[in-house]
Image (tube, grey):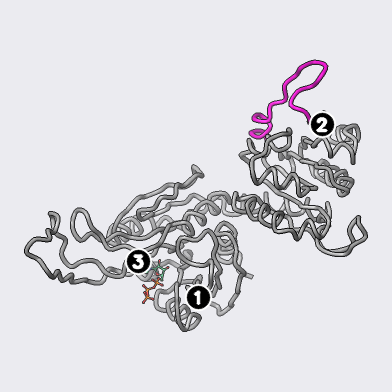
């Protein structure tokens, strides 16, 4: 999977820099083109001569070459890369990356990189456990960077704990698995619903809910990044789709969402029903603004909206799959399971409003995935981008 891939290997000043030589060798051996970018303190630990000999390319460290004045473009480098891996990543570099302190070539390249970034922290256990480091690592995660967690073991200080850089073999494997996953949904068409629906009362008012669309958009981005063509039927949200493989179909009400889904579903291999569809809409919609004068009481009669997931569930062919969501407050698992049956879904993603950090408007979610076959997998609280990956893994490669 690494053959022909353009990889930037960022090396910073930590003892584990010696392991970067092995990582470089493994990447080159697997057929990748590797450009090493090293920080000034990285060069105290490992020489550019070794690295350029192994990569077959001059190592980049400064913004320009001192004697010739040749400018090294971090922008070009950032665009060239299919992936950037920073191994080892010291507390200092992680802090700079998290806060945009672009005082060396490595951090400027990181800030310019459009490709996915992998960060393999390596430091002493107390530095690793410091709230500042943990906060910066969380910031990187929230930017969508992949953190390759350090292992626990004996550290250079002879202290034993978490902080040892992951082994080069494993880092190379993670990169390879990543590129494999990028192709895993190639040729698949996926329909995703996202966001709330707005049910109009009059031209200026509606019934809505707190859904931000973040989970549905994260699913769309992850599916598109894996090569799928995504039709994203979205209620009114502030989030924007980034990947050009995502076709956004903007709708407002549940009825519009149903129409769009019915039009898209026949061509889809799978549908993921992530929208928080309003269960009811006003029975009548006023054509002009409802005025206050003369109306001390207003009664709003509501009628049930169609169940979009269940409608697609009925129309589902054997070659199609549907995943739904269930947001529950009580009897979570039992309610989710009965929804799965009732709507003829293949999988249901349960999130409970009882879990802090899960549900509406957050950047994280904590889910339990229940499959039709009865398997139940509980996941910890994670960024929605990682939850999206777990959901797609479960839907397309059930264990
Ligand atoms: N759903 C849908 N159309 C609706 C209501 C829900 O497509 N009119 C989908 C949601 O996108 C979600 C799943 O059905 O994937 C479950 O939604 P939820 O609101 O939890 O379930 P409801 O069927 O509305 O049941 P209740 O509100 O009674 O819990």
Disc 2/disc 1 C-alpha distance (Å): 51 Å
Q: Identify the residue at image location x=76%, y=17%.
A: 69
Does the rendering let one see residue 135? yes
Does the rendering let one see residue 347? no
- Label 2 crowding class (10 Å Cα cut-off): few <14, some 14-19, many 20+? many
Q: Which residues are magenta?
A: 61-81
Q: Label for residue 59? A: 2
Q: Position of residue 331 (x, y in %)?
A: 47, 84
The mark lying in front, picked from 3 and 2, is 2
Q: Position of residue 128 (x, y in %)?
A: 77, 57
Q: Position of residue 44 (x, y in %)?
A: 89, 38
SS at circle 2: loop
Along the line of sight, the residue nearer the viewer: 268 or 37: 37
SS at circle 3: helix
- The earlier-in-sequence mark between 3 and 1 is 3
Q: Label for residue 308? A: 3
Q: Quadrant of the C terminus?
A: bottom right
Disc 3 within 8 angstroms of ligand 1 (CB): yes
- The earlier-in-sequence mark between 2 and 1 is 2
**318, above or below 94, in the image:** below
- Label 1 crowding class (10 Å Cα cut-off): few <14, some 14-19, many 20+? few
Along the line of sight, the residue nearer the viewer: 66 or 146: 66
**64, above or below 311, in the image:** above
- Label 3 crowding class (10 Å Cα cut-off): few <14, some 14-19, many 20+? many
Q: Is residue 303 left or right of residue 16?
A: left
Along the line of sight, the residue nearer the viewer: 179 or 165: 165
Q: Label for residue 354? A: 1
Quadrant of ligand 1: it is bottom left
The mark lying in front, picked from 2 and 1, is 1
Q: Position of residue 171 (x, y in %)?
A: 78, 52
The mark lying in front, picked from 3 and 1, is 1
């Amino acid at each position: 999977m690494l053959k022909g891939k353009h990889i930037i290997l960022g090396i910073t000043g930590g003892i584990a820099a010696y392991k970067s030589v092995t990582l470089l060798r493994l990447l080159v051996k697997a057929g990748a083109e590797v450009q090493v970018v090293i920080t000034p303190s990285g060069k105290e630990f490992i020489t550019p001569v070794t690295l350029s000999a192994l990569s077959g390319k001059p190592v980049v460290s400064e913004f320009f070459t001192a004697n010739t004045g040749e400018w090294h473009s971090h922008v070009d480098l950032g665009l060239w890369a299919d992936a950037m891996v920073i191994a080892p990543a010291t507390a200092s570099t992680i802090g700079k990356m998290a806060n945009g302190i672009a005082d060396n070539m490595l951090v400027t390249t990181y800030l310019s990189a459009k490709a996915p970034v992998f960060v393999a922290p390596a430091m002493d256990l107390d530095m690793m456990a410091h709230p500042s480091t943990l906060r910066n690592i969380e910031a990187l995660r929230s930017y969508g960077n992949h953190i390759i967690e350090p292992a626990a073991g004996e550290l250079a200080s002879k202290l034993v704990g978490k902080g040892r850089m992951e082994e080069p073999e494993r880092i190379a494997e993670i990169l390879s698995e990543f590129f494999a996953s990028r192709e895993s949904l190639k040729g698949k068409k996926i329909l995703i619903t996202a966001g709330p629906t707005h049910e109009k009362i009059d031209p200026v008012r509606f019934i809505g809910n707190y859904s931000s669309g973040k989970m549905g958009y994260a699913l769309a981005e992850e599916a598109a990044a894996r090569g799928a063509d995504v039709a994203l039927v979205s209620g009114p949200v502030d989030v924007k789709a980034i990947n050009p493989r995502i076709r956004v179909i903007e709708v407002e009400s549940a009825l519009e969402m149903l129409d769009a889904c019915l039009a898209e579903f026949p061509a889809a291999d799978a549908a993921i029903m992530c929208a928080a569809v309003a269960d009811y809409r006003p029975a009548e919609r006023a054509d002009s603004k409802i005025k206050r004068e003369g109306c001390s009481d207003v009664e709003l009669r509501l009628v049930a909206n169609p169940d979009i997931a269940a409608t697609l569930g009925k129309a589902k062919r054997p070659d199609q799959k549907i995943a739904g969501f269930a947001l529950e407050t009580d009897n979570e698992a039992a309610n989710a399971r009965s929804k799965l049956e009732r709507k003829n879904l293949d999988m249901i993603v349960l999130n409970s409003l009882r879990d802090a950090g899960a549900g509406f408007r957050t950047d994280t979610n904590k889910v339990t995935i229940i499959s039709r076959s009865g398997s139940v997998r509980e996941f910890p609280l994670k960024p929605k981008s990682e939850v999206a990956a777990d959901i797609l893994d479960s839907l397309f490669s059930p264990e």
